[in-house]
Image: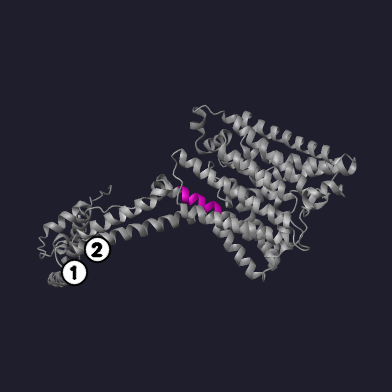
Amino acid sequence: MREQKIPETNEEIAFEEMGFDFPITPTPEELDKMSSEEAKTAAARASATMKEYFESLEKSKRNAARRLYRRKSDQELKGYIAGLPVPPAFPTQDELEAIPRKDRKENRNKIFNERVEFFSSLPPLQAKRIRAIENQAKFNQRTTVVGNALKKYSMLVALILIMTLFTIMTSGRLLLPMNLSNLVFQNAYVVIMAVGMLLCILTGGNIDLSVGSVVGFIAGIAGWLMILNHVPVLPSILICLFVGILIGFWHGFWIAYIGIPPFIATLAGMLIFRGLTLFVLRGGETVNKFPRGFMMLSTGHVPDFFPIFPEFNLTCLLIGILSVAIFLFFRFFGRARKKSKGYKVGSALSFNIVNIVIAIAVIAFTTQLARYKGLPTVTFVLMIIIIIYTILTSMTVPGRYLYALGGNPKAAKLSGIDTKKVMFLAYTNMAFLAAVAGLVFAARLDAAIPSAGDGFELDAIGSCFIGGASAYGGIGTVGGVLIGAIFMGVMNNGMNLFGIQTDLQQVVKGLVLLLAVAFDVVSKRKSR
């Protein structure tokens, strides 16, 4: 027998049919006409009267009476609040920015005087109620702003927390200048691959499993060219990058135009290029001793062009200040651009707090590096890639196509976007950046080894998802990926410094990745 759902109104009808005869109590409008002391006394008397009334009822009806009375009181209060006069409001941040700066103070004083006059004209208790409602609304708004900011910048907060934790656990060794320099060298290739992986993920949650093998293959070709055949550094680098693009064409063709799922196509690529790595390295030999010019790509430091202080690289600090200036320019330019097009830009307070935190972090980071040998040369490669791909994803039409394809593939295709071409370019770009990462990794090792790149795809994928990229595609930023990569690098480095065993490190990394994706999935489920 099918269950029948009882309408919620039946309960209310049943209560009224019970014939409750509630005592008459003063309404909010009547209380407003009294003085504060009189209203307080009347409210206390009404509360005592209602308490006596409820106690006089049978136990079976007492709870029902309370619920009905509470419901009627809430309705009366809502009606009362809706009928209250609305005081003149101060302009919002957006409205304030629309007013000329010279007129803002005058405008604020005018509204302040209007508010004073408004509240003076009301009964004291009513004015007090309106102020309480205003304060509650402001509190709710601030709570919402803080909650949204924490959600939006949750990984930045998590990065700060984990750095603080490992700094304490390692007695400050994590933030030593030498360790920070090593942190850059150890994670440069992860950042490069993660940026490319982001573009693949944006297309619909797709990934590239072949990037680790491509890194090893490109490193093998670099060793074969420069070490075994003594080809000059620059032609060797260009050949390696060209091979990376060809690999991208290969993957993009099968995925975009033949229709093979990216998981399968790149899994095949992982096996193919791992085998070709062994072939290039003559059955698995290790070749080492790259030319010094090539080694500078990933092991050198930028010299100090202003040697004023003997043990402090002033050039490093100046580059840090310049980087902050560029970062702030893009942040403010992007915000102004959104506002000019009518988009909602969010709280100015949280925007400025994030700018200040990141600026302080960059300056502190470059100051520490300046105390050692200065800025690692590979940082320039990272900066160029981050700037180019930030502009590509956020300020260009092809970048918007990536988000559109990941957000709704059918709608993107119907709107005229060549979705096959977008997918093809995403995987071509991934292989190109994997080639760059392969060169950086080979230069760091000063060798081409058969096992180069093993598991690198997991670091790249993990950095993207930890940095806020959606498992469903269409959501993610280069800045978020950078934070995710730094998070994984700090976690690896911190666990090594603290002496945590390798097997336990793998467990921790797996759990962090699982929680990051679970957070994304649950968030999407709640928003539906």
Element type at mark 1: helix
**For residue 490, side relative to residue 307 (left or right):** left
Q: Are marks 2 and 1 in contact (CB under 8 Å)?
A: yes
Determine the residue positioned at 62% across, 60% down. Answer: 508
Graded by Cα atoms within 10 Å as few (under 14), some (14 to 19) or many (20 or more), the crowding at tag 1 reads some
What mark, if any, has residue 36 been given in the picture? 1
Secondary structure predominantly adopted by residues drawn in magenta: helix
Tell me which numbered mark, 2 or 1, is placed earlier along the sequence: 1
Pick whichever, 321 or 523, lies toward us: 321
Going by the numbered disc 2, the residue's amino acid type is Lys
Q: Is residue 448 visible?
A: no
76 relative position to 208: left or right: left
Q: Residue at x 64, y 41 (%)?
A: 388
Residue at disc 2, secondary structure: helix
Residue 389 location, x and y as percent? Answer: 63, 41
Q: How has the structure been colored for display?
A: one colour
For disc 2, the marked residue is: 128
Compared across the picture, whether 261 is left or right of 210 comes to left
Q: Position of residue 454 (x, y in %)?
A: 73, 50
**Visible in this render: residue 24?**
yes
Q: Nearer the viewer, residue 522 or 219?
A: 219
Which segment did they paint magenta?
516-524
Q: What's the residue type where badge 1 is placed?
A: Ser
Q: CA distance from mark 2 to mark 1?
A: 10 Å
Q: Which quarter of the figure has residue 202?
A: top right
x, y percentage for residue 419?
57, 30
Q: Is residue 210 magenta?
A: no
- Residue 518 included in the magenta stretch of the image: yes
Q: Residue at x 55, y 50 (%)?
A: 468
| Residue 122 in the image: above or below residue 168 | above
